Image: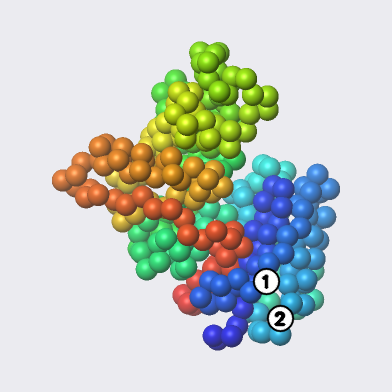
Amino acid sequence: MSDSLAIGVDIGGTKIAYGLVDRQGAVHAAHRLPTLPEEGTEAVINRIVQGIEHMLTLTDAPIVGIGMGSPGQINPHTGVVYLATNLDWHNVELVQGVRQRLSRDIPVWLHNDANASAMGEMLFGAAKGCSDFLILTVGTGLGGAAISGGKLLLGGKFVAMEVGHIPVIPNGRLCRCGALGCPEMYASGTGMMAGLEDHLPHYPFSVLADKENVSTEDILAAAREGDALGVLLVDEIVNGLLAVTVPIIGLLDPLRVVVGGGLGLAAWDLLGERLTNRLHEELSQTVFEDIPVVKSEVLSSAVGAASLVWYELDNR
Protein backbone atom coordinates (compact mmCIF):
# COMPACT_ATOMS: atom_id res chain seq x y z
CA MET A 1 0.00 0.00 0.00
CA SER A 2 2.95 2.27 -0.67
CA ASP A 3 0.87 4.52 -2.95
CA SER A 4 -2.12 4.61 -0.57
CA LEU A 5 -2.93 7.77 1.37
CA ALA A 6 -4.66 8.66 4.63
CA ILE A 7 -6.60 11.83 5.31
CA GLY A 8 -5.73 13.61 8.56
CA VAL A 9 -8.20 16.05 10.09
CA ASP A 10 -7.17 18.20 13.06
CA ILE A 11 -10.15 19.96 14.62
CA GLY A 12 -9.21 23.08 16.57
CA GLY A 13 -11.22 25.81 18.23
CA THR A 14 -10.57 28.23 15.36
CA LYS A 15 -9.53 26.12 12.36
CA ILE A 16 -9.81 22.63 10.89
CA ALA A 17 -6.58 21.46 9.23
CA TYR A 18 -6.57 18.70 6.61
CA GLY A 19 -3.76 16.71 5.03
CA LEU A 20 -3.30 13.91 2.50
CA VAL A 21 -0.53 11.90 4.15
CA ASP A 22 1.40 8.88 2.89
CA ARG A 23 2.87 5.94 4.78
CA GLN A 24 6.13 7.83 5.34
CA GLY A 25 4.38 10.85 6.87
CA ALA A 26 4.82 13.10 3.81
CA VAL A 27 2.01 15.57 3.15
CA HIS A 28 0.79 15.46 -0.47
CA ALA A 29 -1.84 18.19 -0.10
CA ALA A 30 -3.15 20.41 2.68
CA HIS A 31 -6.29 22.44 3.29
CA ARG A 32 -7.86 24.57 6.02
CA LEU A 33 -11.34 25.70 6.93
CA PRO A 34 -12.57 27.85 9.83
CA THR A 35 -14.20 25.85 12.63
CA LEU A 36 -16.85 28.46 13.58
CA PRO A 37 -18.15 26.50 16.60
CA GLU A 38 -20.64 29.27 17.33
CA GLU A 39 -22.65 28.03 14.32
CA GLY A 40 -23.42 24.80 16.20
CA THR A 41 -22.36 21.16 16.19
CA GLU A 42 -24.15 20.12 12.99
CA ALA A 43 -22.58 22.98 11.05
CA VAL A 44 -19.09 22.05 12.27
CA ILE A 45 -19.56 18.37 11.33
CA ASN A 46 -20.82 19.44 7.91
CA ARG A 47 -17.71 21.60 7.49
CA ILE A 48 -15.42 18.74 8.58
CA VAL A 49 -17.00 16.56 5.86
CA GLN A 50 -16.84 19.39 3.31
CA GLY A 51 -13.06 19.53 3.80
CA ILE A 52 -12.69 15.74 3.57
CA GLU A 53 -14.67 15.69 0.32
CA HIS A 54 -12.38 18.40 -1.03
CA MET A 55 -9.31 16.30 -0.15
CA LEU A 56 -10.83 13.33 -1.97
CA THR A 57 -10.94 15.39 -5.19
CA LEU A 58 -7.19 16.09 -4.99
CA THR A 59 -5.93 12.54 -5.56
CA ASP A 60 -6.59 9.35 -7.52
CA ALA A 61 -4.68 7.28 -4.93
CA PRO A 62 -6.61 4.85 -2.71
CA ILE A 63 -7.70 6.45 0.58
CA VAL A 64 -7.35 3.77 3.26
CA GLY A 65 -8.75 5.75 6.18
CA ILE A 66 -9.46 9.06 7.84
CA GLY A 67 -7.90 10.00 11.16
CA MET A 68 -9.35 12.82 13.24
CA GLY A 69 -7.82 14.61 16.21
CA SER A 70 -10.17 16.67 18.37
CA PRO A 71 -9.81 18.51 21.64
CA GLY A 72 -11.68 17.16 24.63
CA GLN A 73 -12.60 13.94 26.39
CA ILE A 74 -13.05 11.31 23.70
CA ASN A 75 -13.91 7.63 23.56
CA PRO A 76 -11.84 6.35 20.63
CA HIS A 77 -13.70 3.02 20.64
CA THR A 78 -17.13 4.57 20.04
CA GLY A 79 -16.07 7.78 18.28
CA VAL A 80 -17.96 9.94 20.78
CA VAL A 81 -16.68 13.29 22.06
CA TYR A 82 -17.97 13.38 25.64
CA LEU A 83 -16.85 16.94 26.27
CA ALA A 84 -14.93 19.55 24.27
CA THR A 85 -15.25 22.86 26.08
CA ASN A 86 -13.87 25.18 23.40
CA LEU A 87 -16.25 23.67 20.83
CA ASP A 88 -19.17 23.54 23.28
CA TRP A 89 -19.59 19.86 22.47
CA HIS A 90 -21.31 17.40 24.81
CA ASN A 91 -21.74 13.73 23.85
CA VAL A 92 -21.24 14.35 20.12
CA GLU A 93 -21.21 11.17 18.00
CA LEU A 94 -18.50 12.55 15.73
CA VAL A 95 -17.34 9.43 13.87
CA GLN A 96 -20.90 8.36 13.14
CA GLY A 97 -21.83 11.89 12.06
CA VAL A 98 -18.90 12.10 9.66
CA ARG A 99 -19.39 8.63 8.17
CA GLN A 100 -23.12 9.23 7.58
CA ARG A 101 -22.36 12.38 5.57
CA LEU A 102 -19.43 11.07 3.50
CA SER A 103 -19.96 10.18 -0.15
CA ARG A 104 -17.66 7.14 0.21
CA ASP A 105 -17.47 4.33 2.74
CA ILE A 106 -14.08 4.99 4.38
CA PRO A 107 -12.98 3.89 7.89
CA VAL A 108 -12.73 6.78 10.35
CA TRP A 109 -10.70 6.85 13.57
CA LEU A 110 -10.84 9.52 16.27
CA HIS A 111 -8.57 10.43 19.18
CA ASN A 112 -7.86 13.33 21.46
CA ASP A 113 -5.54 15.78 19.66
CA ALA A 114 -2.65 15.26 22.10
CA ASN A 115 -2.89 11.49 21.59
CA ALA A 116 -2.83 12.06 17.82
CA SER A 117 0.29 14.18 18.24
CA ALA A 118 1.95 11.40 20.23
CA MET A 119 1.14 8.89 17.52
CA GLY A 120 2.57 11.18 14.88
CA GLU A 121 5.82 11.57 16.82
CA MET A 122 6.11 7.79 17.31
CA LEU A 123 5.57 6.98 13.64
CA PHE A 124 7.21 9.93 11.92
CA GLY A 125 8.85 12.32 14.37
CA ALA A 126 11.02 12.88 17.42
CA ALA A 127 10.02 9.55 19.02
CA LYS A 128 10.29 7.37 15.90
CA GLY A 129 10.94 3.82 17.02
CA CYS A 130 10.60 4.76 20.71
CA SER A 131 8.18 2.56 22.64
CA ASP A 132 7.96 4.69 25.81
CA PHE A 133 7.77 8.47 25.86
CA LEU A 134 5.80 11.51 26.98
CA ILE A 135 4.66 14.41 24.85
CA LEU A 136 3.80 17.82 26.30
CA THR A 137 1.88 20.14 23.99
CA VAL A 138 2.37 23.73 25.12
CA GLY A 139 -0.06 26.02 23.34
CA THR A 140 -3.00 28.15 24.41
CA GLY A 141 -3.48 25.39 26.99
CA LEU A 142 -1.28 22.51 28.15
CA GLY A 143 -1.92 18.99 26.90
CA GLY A 144 -0.09 15.72 27.16
CA ALA A 145 -0.04 12.11 26.09
CA ALA A 146 2.03 9.03 26.83
CA ILE A 147 3.06 6.00 24.83
CA SER A 148 3.90 3.04 27.05
CA GLY A 149 5.07 -0.24 25.55
CA GLY A 150 4.17 1.12 22.11
CA LYS A 151 0.54 1.74 23.11
CA LEU A 152 -1.34 4.93 23.92
CA LEU A 153 -2.31 5.31 27.57
CA LEU A 154 -6.02 6.11 27.56
CA GLY A 155 -7.30 5.60 31.11
CA GLY A 156 -10.68 4.44 32.35
CA LYS A 157 -12.49 7.63 31.32
CA PHE A 158 -10.11 8.41 28.43
CA VAL A 159 -8.49 11.37 30.21
CA ALA A 160 -5.12 9.82 31.05
CA MET A 161 -2.28 12.38 30.84
CA GLU A 162 -4.59 15.40 31.16
CA VAL A 163 -1.47 17.10 32.46
CA GLY A 164 -2.74 20.66 32.24
CA HIS A 165 -5.31 20.03 34.96
CA ILE A 166 -3.46 18.04 37.60
CA PRO A 167 -3.30 20.60 40.45
CA VAL A 168 0.31 20.14 41.58
CA ILE A 169 1.44 23.70 42.34
CA PRO A 170 0.74 24.57 46.01
CA ASN A 171 -1.31 27.76 46.54
CA GLY A 172 -1.36 28.23 42.77
CA ARG A 173 -3.52 30.30 40.46
CA LEU A 174 -7.19 29.58 39.99
CA CYS A 175 -7.67 27.66 36.77
CA ARG A 176 -10.69 27.91 34.47
CA CYS A 177 -11.40 24.25 35.36
CA GLY A 178 -12.07 25.38 38.94
CA ALA A 179 -8.96 23.88 40.57
CA LEU A 180 -6.03 25.77 42.11
CA GLY A 181 -2.46 25.29 40.91
CA CYS A 182 -2.98 23.57 37.56
CA PRO A 183 0.19 23.57 35.40
CA GLU A 184 -1.82 25.05 32.52
CA MET A 185 -1.99 28.31 34.50
CA TYR A 186 1.82 28.56 34.22
CA ALA A 187 2.98 26.50 31.23
CA SER A 188 0.78 27.75 28.38
CA GLY A 189 -0.20 30.91 26.57
CA THR A 190 -3.08 31.31 29.03
CA GLY A 191 -0.66 30.84 31.93
CA MET A 192 1.86 33.30 30.49
CA MET A 193 -0.77 36.03 30.26
CA ALA A 194 -1.96 35.26 33.81
CA GLY A 195 1.65 35.53 34.98
CA LEU A 196 2.07 38.84 33.17
CA GLU A 197 -0.97 40.24 34.98
CA ASP A 198 0.31 38.93 38.35
CA HIS A 199 3.89 40.16 38.06
CA LEU A 200 3.75 43.31 35.91
CA PRO A 201 3.08 45.69 38.86
CA HIS A 202 6.37 44.52 40.41
CA TYR A 203 8.41 45.15 37.21
CA PRO A 204 7.72 48.79 36.25
CA PHE A 205 10.99 49.00 34.27
CA SER A 206 10.33 45.92 32.13
CA VAL A 207 10.16 46.52 28.38
CA LEU A 208 6.73 44.88 28.62
CA ALA A 209 5.43 47.60 30.97
CA ASP A 210 5.22 50.15 28.14
CA LYS A 211 3.51 47.88 25.64
CA GLU A 212 -0.18 47.68 24.94
CA ASN A 213 -1.77 44.32 24.10
CA VAL A 214 1.31 42.28 25.01
CA SER A 215 1.49 38.95 23.16
CA THR A 216 3.33 35.74 24.00
CA GLU A 217 5.74 36.63 21.16
CA ASP A 218 6.50 39.92 22.94
CA ILE A 219 7.21 38.05 26.18
CA LEU A 220 9.55 35.58 24.45
CA ALA A 221 11.38 38.43 22.70
CA ALA A 222 11.81 40.20 26.06
CA ALA A 223 13.16 37.00 27.64
CA ARG A 224 15.69 36.62 24.81
CA GLU A 225 16.91 40.16 25.56
CA GLY A 226 17.32 39.26 29.25
CA ASP A 227 14.36 41.31 30.47
CA ALA A 228 13.74 40.20 34.06
CA LEU A 229 9.97 39.87 33.70
CA GLY A 230 10.26 37.98 30.41
CA VAL A 231 12.78 35.59 31.96
CA LEU A 232 10.53 35.08 35.00
CA LEU A 233 7.56 34.13 32.79
CA VAL A 234 9.66 31.62 30.85
CA ASP A 235 10.90 30.18 34.15
CA GLU A 236 7.26 29.78 35.19
CA ILE A 237 6.67 27.67 32.08
CA VAL A 238 9.63 25.48 33.03
CA ASN A 239 8.45 25.19 36.64
CA GLY A 240 4.92 24.32 35.55
CA LEU A 241 6.17 21.60 33.20
CA LEU A 242 8.53 20.23 35.84
CA ALA A 243 5.85 20.08 38.53
CA VAL A 244 3.81 17.62 36.51
CA THR A 245 6.54 15.88 34.46
CA VAL A 246 8.76 14.71 37.32
CA PRO A 247 6.07 12.57 39.01
CA ILE A 248 4.89 11.21 35.67
CA ILE A 249 8.45 10.16 34.83
CA GLY A 250 8.57 8.40 38.20
CA LEU A 251 5.36 6.55 37.39
CA LEU A 252 5.87 5.69 33.71
CA ASP A 253 9.67 5.51 33.21
CA PRO A 254 9.71 7.06 29.70
CA LEU A 255 12.81 7.06 27.51
CA ARG A 256 12.33 10.65 26.35
CA VAL A 257 10.13 13.72 26.69
CA VAL A 258 8.89 15.44 23.53
CA VAL A 259 7.84 19.10 23.70
CA GLY A 260 5.46 20.42 21.05
CA GLY A 261 2.55 22.80 20.64
CA GLY A 262 2.67 26.27 19.10
CA LEU A 263 4.18 27.98 22.15
CA GLY A 264 6.43 25.03 22.96
CA LEU A 265 8.01 25.21 19.50
CA ALA A 266 8.18 29.03 19.44
CA ALA A 267 9.95 29.06 22.82
CA TRP A 268 12.09 25.96 22.29
CA ASP A 269 15.37 27.95 22.34
CA LEU A 270 14.39 29.24 25.80
CA LEU A 271 12.84 26.04 27.16
CA GLY A 272 14.78 23.05 25.85
CA GLU A 273 18.06 23.36 27.72
CA ARG A 274 16.45 24.82 30.86
CA LEU A 275 13.94 21.97 31.08
CA THR A 276 16.59 19.31 30.43
CA ASN A 277 18.93 20.66 33.11
CA ARG A 278 16.19 21.02 35.70
CA LEU A 279 14.87 17.51 35.05
CA HIS A 280 18.35 16.09 35.57
CA GLU A 281 18.69 18.07 38.82
CA GLU A 282 15.37 16.87 40.21
CA LEU A 283 15.38 13.21 39.18
CA SER A 284 17.40 10.55 40.96
CA GLN A 285 20.21 9.77 38.53
CA THR A 286 20.75 6.38 40.13
CA VAL A 287 17.24 5.35 39.08
CA PHE A 288 16.52 7.59 36.07
CA GLU A 289 19.52 8.18 33.86
CA ASP A 290 19.51 11.33 31.75
CA ILE A 291 16.17 11.49 29.93
CA PRO A 292 16.46 13.57 26.76
CA VAL A 293 14.00 16.41 26.23
CA VAL A 294 13.50 16.80 22.48
CA LYS A 295 11.61 19.12 20.19
CA SER A 296 8.54 17.88 18.31
CA GLU A 297 9.35 17.11 14.67
CA VAL A 298 5.81 16.66 13.32
CA LEU A 299 4.91 20.23 12.48
CA SER A 300 1.61 19.50 10.72
CA SER A 301 -1.22 18.63 13.09
CA ALA A 302 -2.91 16.82 10.21
CA VAL A 303 0.01 14.36 10.08
CA GLY A 304 -0.62 13.43 13.71
CA ALA A 305 -4.28 12.82 12.89
CA ALA A 306 -3.45 10.79 9.77
CA SER A 307 -0.98 8.68 11.75
CA LEU A 308 -3.98 7.21 13.61
CA VAL A 309 -4.90 5.47 10.36
CA TRP A 310 -1.46 3.95 9.81
CA TYR A 311 -1.23 2.88 13.45
CA GLU A 312 -4.63 1.15 13.33
CA LEU A 313 -3.88 -0.60 10.05
CA ASP A 314 -0.49 -1.78 11.36
CA ASN A 315 -1.99 -3.13 14.58
CA ARG A 316 -5.02 -4.92 13.21
Residue drawn where x is 59% and y is 68% of the image? 306
Looking at the rendered structure, the kind of residue marked 1 is: Ala
User: For this rendering, which residue is in front, 5 or 132?
Assistant: 5
Q: What secondary structure is found at the residue carrying circle 1? A: strand
Q: Which mark is residue 59?
A: 2
Mark 2 vs 1: CB contact within 8 A: yes
Q: Position of residue 29 (x, y in %)?
A: 67, 71
Q: Who's the residue at 52% across and 35% down the image? A: 220
Looking at the picture, does residue 201 appear above or below residue 18? above
The quadrant of the picture occupied by the N terminus is: bottom right
Identify which residue is drawn at 73% across, 72% down: 55
Q: CA distance from mark 2 to mark 1?
A: 9 Å
Give the x, y percent position of residue 182.
49, 32
Mark 1 is surrounded, within 10 Å at the Cα level, by few (under 14), some (14 to 19) or many (20 or more) other residues, namely few
The quadrant where residue 67 appears: bottom right
**Label 1 sits on residue:** 29
Residue closer to the observer: 91 or 99? 99
Q: What sort of colour scheme is used for the picture?
A: rainbow
37 shown above or below 68: above
Report which quarter residue 285 is drawn in: top left
Q: Residue furthest front?
A: 225
- Relative depth, front residue between 58 and 67: 58
From the viewer's perspective, is 285 left or right of 179? left
